[in-house]
Amino acid sequence: MDALIGMTGLGMLAQVESVTLTPLGATIMGLSIVAVLGMVGFCMYRVLTLPPVVDEHLKCPLDIDTGDTQDAD
């Protein structure tokens, strides 16, 4: 059974007692989390503060005259 665990790579996981995060690793992880959250916040702010859409230039299909309803022959 030990040979099977060694071949599958699970033996390496069993041998590792503890893994610590170095100060440089913690700094890089913290900066990346702050960057991602900052970008999400910026994008949400930009989307939620858009000006309202003015509907004056939009026309519904009943207001558009295509000219095909008069003189159908």
Image (spheres, rainbow, N blue to C red):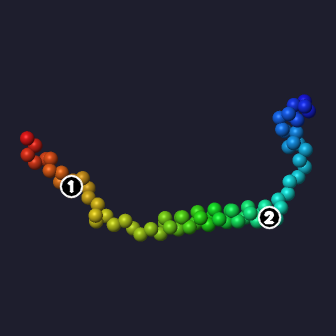
**Quadrant containing the N terminus in the rendered view:** top right
Q: Residue at x 85, y 43 (%)?
A: 13
Instruction: Say which quarter of the image contains residue 12.
Output: top right
Picture mark count: 2
Instruction: Say which quarter of the image contains residue 5.
Output: top right
| Image marks 1 and 2: residues in contact by CB distance under 8 Å | no
Measured as percent of width and height from the top left, residue 27 is found at 76, 65
Depth check: give the residue in front, 14 or 23: 23
Measured as percent of width and height from the top left, residue 53 is found at 37, 65
Query: Identity of the amino acid at label 2?
Result: Leu
Q: Which mark is residue 29?
A: none
Q: Which residue is mark 2?
A: 24
Q: Residue at x 88, y 52 (%)?
A: 18
**Quadrant containing the C terminus in the rendered view:** top left
Instruction: Please name which of the two marks, 1 or 2, marks the residue nearer to the observer.
Output: 2
Instruction: Classify 10 Å Cα crowding around label 2: few (below 14), some (14-19), many (20 and above).
Output: few
Above/below status of 31 relative to 15: below
Query: Identity of the amino acid at label 1?
Result: Ile
Above/below status of 61 relative to 51: above
Disc 1, SS: loop
Q: Is residue 43 left or right of residue 31?
A: left
Measured as percent of width and height from the top left, residue 59 is found at 26, 58
Instruction: Say which quarter of the image contains residue 64.
Output: bottom left
Measured as percent of width and height from the top left, residue 45 is found at 53, 68
Q: Which residue is mark 1?
A: 64
Q: Is residue 33 left or right of residue 16?
A: left
Q: Earlier in the sequence, mark 1 or mark 2?
A: 2
Q: Is residue 41 left or right of residue 30?
A: left
Q: Residue at x 31, y 64 (%)?
A: 55
Q: Is residue 8 left or right of residue 46?
A: right
Depth check: give the residue in front, 53 or 27: 27
Instruction: Classify 10 Å Cα crowding around label 1: few (below 14), some (14-19), many (20 and above).
Output: few
